[in-house]
Image: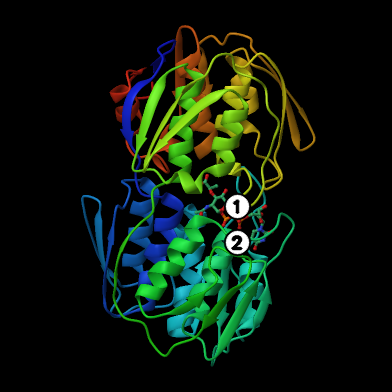
Amino acid sequence: MIKGGVPLHGEVTISGSKNAVLPIMAATLLTAEPCVIRRVPNLSDVKFMAEILKSLGAQVKLDGDTLQVRAEKIKGVGDYELIRKMRGSVCIMGPLLGRLKKATVSLPGGCIIGARPINLHLKGFEALGAKITVEAGYVRAQAKRLVGSDVFLGGRAGSTVLGTANVMMAAALAEGVTIIESAACEPEVVDVANFLNSMGAKIIGAGSPTITVTGVKELHGAEHEVIPDRIEAATYALAAAATNGKVTLLGARPDHMHAVLDKMRDAGVKVERRGTALTVSRNGRLKPVDITTLPYSGFPTDAQAQMMVLMAVTPGISIITERIFESRFMHVSELARLGADIEIEGPSAIVKGGRPLSGAPVMASDLRASAALVIAGLTAKGATQVNRVYHLDRGYENIDGKLRQLGARIERVEET
Ligand code: EPZ
């Protein structure tokens, strides 16, 4: 339940990155030795991944934001139901294939934001010599030996983030050299590569479209601190601007957020940086800007919905084009319930901004759409009820607590 109309003020600490910690948790399967991961966000997706690691035979201990994993003896088949429920778990395939030369997981189904096939992941595994079979809802990868090779991971929307991480993890224990072309350049991929290198892997070029992996015989345990979540940071920055508040993000990585901060500045938002602290406030009247989502370092698709809310409260017309996922405008019809004027034309949404929003009951459909509905509720006059907040808990640590810390009138109540 949100009572809107209060500008957000104060400081908020950014948690560890969901999209970095999930593949890093999977990477602990590459060694029998203990691994320690720090700044692990308290999210339902993290709990899911921990259950999946346990179902494979690993010992897992989560103590506050520190995770200890020891995958001494593991099996190559993960729990069907657990894996089916969380797409991100597909990234256990690379580590299992790398270490055991076999991996079986339930085929991830479609998702509300798009078809999300894993053909590029499988193409990468095949290039390393794995045989792929799909049967009874399972996808199986098996190989006598894994041998380094060149693989091109470019697809319909550019590269694949988890596909790059998956192939990199399998190649880390392959014989010889693997060159991944059209690799994803996201900071989360770099964080996975840094963790793998601290385990003894030989990976260069992460963060660029060409990654070279020289396989090694085995990997050892390691300790790692996960990068801060750039999408969580972008969400609080956009909430500050949309509510006409002033918020300082602590522990963020502004150097991972250039595209979002650049567009915010264009829209008339003031962004001040002091070390890892980022202060966001309005700088006079907001201006409409056009956005196209692209692979990193372009504008992130995971901040598209939240940016749309800022444009919905900005007088003028802006065009938001989604190039990564086919159907990532589920939030548009719910924003219309709050009075926003947005029309969808193919891959673009035309936002006629500036109309005041008013509170209403709305339904969350996916993680980032629900974050957008929360921001809209914070700007709207009256009360907004956001239903199905379990979507939010998948990717935002204690979002209602952090927002209350910034002065928001927000409360988590049992759904009636
Ligand atoms: C990661 O998903 C993130 N998830 C997503 O964040 C994010 O939206 C996405 O990258 C893009 O930035 C995690 O890291 C857990 P992709 P991923 O493979 O790796 C197509 C969030 O809100 N594709 O880079 O699954 C695919 O359909 C989530 O936190 C193929 O065609 O995304 C999509 O259109 C949502 N074949 C595009 O590529 C493949 O084999 C990019 O997908 C793989 C992908």
Name the residue type under label 1. Tyr
Numbered badge on residue 184: 2
* Res 263 quadrant in image: top right
Local crowd at mark 2 within 10 Å, few (<14), some, or many (≥20)?
many
Placement of the C terminus among the 4 image quadrants: top left
- At x 38%, y 48%, the residue is 228
Q: Relative to 156, is 29 above or below?
A: below
Position of residue 213 relative to residue 410, above or below, is below
Q: Is residue 412 in view from this perspective?
A: no
Q: Earlier in the sequence, mark 2 or mark 1?
A: 2
Label 1: few (<14), some or many (≥20) within 10 Å? many
Contact? badges 2 and 1 (CB < 8 Å): yes
Residue 268 in view: yes
Q: Quadrant of ligand 1?
A: bottom right
Could you give the CA–CA distance between mark 2 and mark 1, rounded to whole angstroms? 7 Å
Residue that appears at 55% across and 31% down: 306
The answer to which image quadrant residue 326 occupies is: top right
Asked if the beta carbon under badge 2 is closer than 8 A to the nearest atom of ligand 1, the reply is: yes
Q: Position of residue 170 (x, y in %)?
A: 51, 78
Q: Position of residue 310 (x, y in %)?
A: 57, 23
Q: Secondary structure at mark 2?
A: loop
In the rendered image, which quarter is residue 349 located in? top right
Residue 324 to residue 61: above or below = above
Q: What quarter of the picture does the N terminus occupy?
A: top left
| Residue found at x 45% / y 76% | 96
Report the front residue among 383 and 414.
383
Regarding mark 1 in the picture, which secondary structure is present there?
Answer: loop
Q: Give the residue at mark 1.
A: 296
Q: Residue at x 52, y 28 (%)?
A: 372
The reply to whether the residue tagged 1 has its Cβ within 8 angstroms of ligand 1 is: yes
The numbered dot on residue 113 is none
**Residue 175 position (above or below residue 32):** below
